[in-house]
């Protein structure tokens, strides 16, 4: 049994969140929480059993939900309206007292204070085209916003009141036309890795842990090159053109593997990470749920749960290095696209 016994899955098509319990390599659905229109990202404060879910609508917003671990239910607690557009990525910082958000459609990012589960109005706002994700450093001193539209990572210092202060330089480039999307930091905080949507790569940035600045130092392919996928471009339909369609990125056990999803061929690829942080082209691939936008690994690295935008089920795998063994497929909802272990 994983040390994380609950799994949450966002079903954007149904506007719901499914709660599963993981035990003995099996998922059991405990509850489904409705009324979360278009939910495609959420952040979890496990120490307080709070979930911050981004919803669409007029206006869009961030809804705070209280999690009942025994029943799996999520009860609305508070809401922050976002008239400028909904969030595509949320991340907590500073022990749950700050929330960072990135809006793809709105082209803006925010930092907000959080008190007793209530998200306050943004104290800082930044603008870049098609912002796709944001993560803080583990110490809460810095934040990194990924702009797919401008092929860059914007880097900031987080002030005492969560102000966003640009570093010098304020941005670091990704390869032109690569479409940077999701990012992760290494446990040592000395590397940042970014998944690209159009080129299907994992970009490796060295990180100055004192100054917070990034430098692009390497890259590896994360899609199945035997499928002859073409390099995608902004605005193209990747399915009709058989283009690369990279999506999500997560660490495997012990920091030796980065798992990446690609939606056109519906694969999960294993990118090996050396002790010095360099990455190697993925060679092992697993076909998974159709159009896998989101997936997650358990904290101990033993389990992986994948969702598909064109599937109503999630797949549960056990993980052995770069190999996945399917244990179960179980119903969740329409348009499943975000997964987190709690």
Image: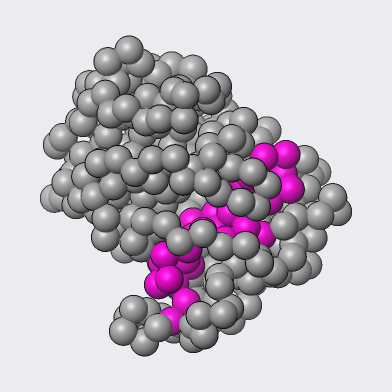
Left or right? Give the position of 62 relative to 259.
Answer: left
Residue sitting at 61 percent across and 51 percent down?
323
Q: How many marks?
A: 0
Closer-to-camera residue (45/311):
311
Q: Position of residue 177 (x, y in %)?
A: 53, 81
Quarter of the image that includes the C terminus = top left
Closer-to-camera residue (244/105):
244
* Outermost right residue: 276
Residue sitting at 81 percent across and 54 percent down?
274
Q: Position of residue 233 (x, y in %)?
A: 44, 83
Left or right? Give the position of 6 relative to 177.
Answer: left
* As drawn, 227 above or below 210: below
Q: Position of residue 239 (x, y in %)?
A: 34, 78
Q: Position of residue 178 (x, y in %)?
A: 55, 76
Is-magenta flag for residue 319? no
When asked about the image quadrant of residue 137, the answer is top right
Res. 215 visible in picture: no
**How was this image coloured?**
one colour
- Please state the extent of the stretch shown in magenta in the rendering: 243-271
* As drawn, 158 above or below 152: above
Residue sitting at 32 percent across and 12 percent down?
70
Residue sitting at 62 percent across and 58 percent down?
270
Is-magenta flag for residue 249? yes
* As drawn, 183 above or below 225: above
Closer-to-camera residue (193/121):
193
Res. 294 visible in picture: yes
């Amino acid at each position: 049994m994983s040390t994380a016994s609950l799994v949450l899955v966002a079903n954007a098509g149904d506007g719901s969140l499914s709660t599963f319990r993981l035990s003995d390599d099996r998922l059991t659905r405990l509850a489904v929480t409705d009324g979360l229109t278009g939910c495609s990202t959420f952040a979890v404060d496990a120490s307080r059993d709070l979930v911050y879910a981004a919803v669409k609508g007029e206006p869009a917003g961030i809804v705070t939900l209280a999690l009942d671990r025994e029943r799996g239910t999520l009860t609305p607690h508070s809401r922050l309206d976002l008239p400028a557009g909904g969030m595509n990525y949320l991340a907590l910082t500073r022990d749950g007292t700050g929330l960072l958000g990135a809006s793809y459609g709105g082209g803006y990012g925010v930092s907000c204070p959080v008190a007793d589960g209530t998200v306050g109005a943004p104290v800082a706002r930044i603008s870049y085209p098609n912002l796709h994700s944001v993560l803080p450093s583990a110490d809460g001193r810095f934040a990194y916003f990924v702009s797919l539209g401008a092929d860059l990572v914007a880097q900031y210092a987080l002030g005492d009141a969560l102000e966003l202060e640009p570093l010098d330089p304020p941005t670091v480039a990704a390869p032109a036309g690569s479409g940077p999307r999701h990012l992760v930091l290494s446990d040592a905080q000395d590397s940042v890795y970014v998944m690209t949507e159009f080129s299907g790569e994992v970009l490796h940035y060295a990180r100055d842990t004192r100054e917070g600045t990034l430098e692009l130092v390497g890259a590896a392919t994360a899609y199945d090159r035997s499928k002859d996928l073409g390099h995608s471009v902004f605005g193209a339909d990747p399915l009709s053109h058989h283009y690369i369609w990279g999506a999500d990125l997560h660490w495997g056990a012990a920091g030796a593997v980065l798992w990446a999803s690609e939606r056109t061929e519906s694969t999960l690829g294993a990118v090996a990470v050396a002790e010095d942080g360099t990455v190697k082209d993925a060679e092992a691939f697993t076909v998974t749920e159709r159009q896998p936008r989101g997936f997650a690994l358990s904290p101990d690295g033993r389990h992986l749960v994948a969702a598909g935008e064109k599937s109503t089920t999630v797949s549960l795998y056990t993980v052995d290095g770069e190999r996945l063994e399917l244990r179960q497929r179980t119903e969740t909802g329409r348009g499943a696209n975000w997964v987190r272990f709690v």
